[in-house]
Image (cartoon, rainbow, N blue to C red):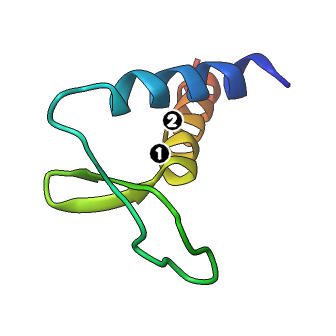
Amino acid sequence: MDENKKLAIELAKALIQNSSVKPVHNKGYKDETDLIVYSIDNLEYTFNNIVLHFLESLKKVEDYY
């Protein structure tokens, strides 16, 4: 696994540990049952979406510099 993926996962883990982020269980997103999503400012994201957000942001920073 490349370093950006590892960092994106670590950043996502740190984010979901924030007290303002609430886990929401069994939302039934698409075909995945028993999926845990995280509520951030009344919007819900899967862990995968959070990781992808950080990964895309890291790529933008890398491309910029």
Quadrant of the rendered image containing residue 32: bottom right
Residue 31 image position (x, y, % from top left): 63, 82
Q: Are marks 2 and 1 in contact (CB under 8 Å)?
A: yes
Q: Nearer the viewer, mark 2 or mark 1?
A: 1
Category of crowding for the residue at label 1, using alpha-carbon neighbours closer than 10 angstroms: few (below 14), some (14–19), many (at least 20): many
Q: Identify the residue at image location x=48%, y=78%.
A: 28
14 horizontally vs 57: left or right: left
Quadrant of the rendered image containing residue 17: top left
At label 2, the amino acid type is Phe
Quadrant of the rendered image containing residue 58: top right
Residue 19 image position (x, y, % from top left): 17, 28
17 horizontally vs 19: left or right: right
At label 1, the amino acid type is Ile
Quadrant of the drawing holding the C terminus: top right
Q: Identify the residue at image location x=38%, y=61%.
A: 25
On residue 50, the disc is: 1
- 28 is higher (above) or lower (below) than 1: below
- 26 is higher (above) or lower (below) than 13: below
Q: Which residue is mark 2?
A: 54
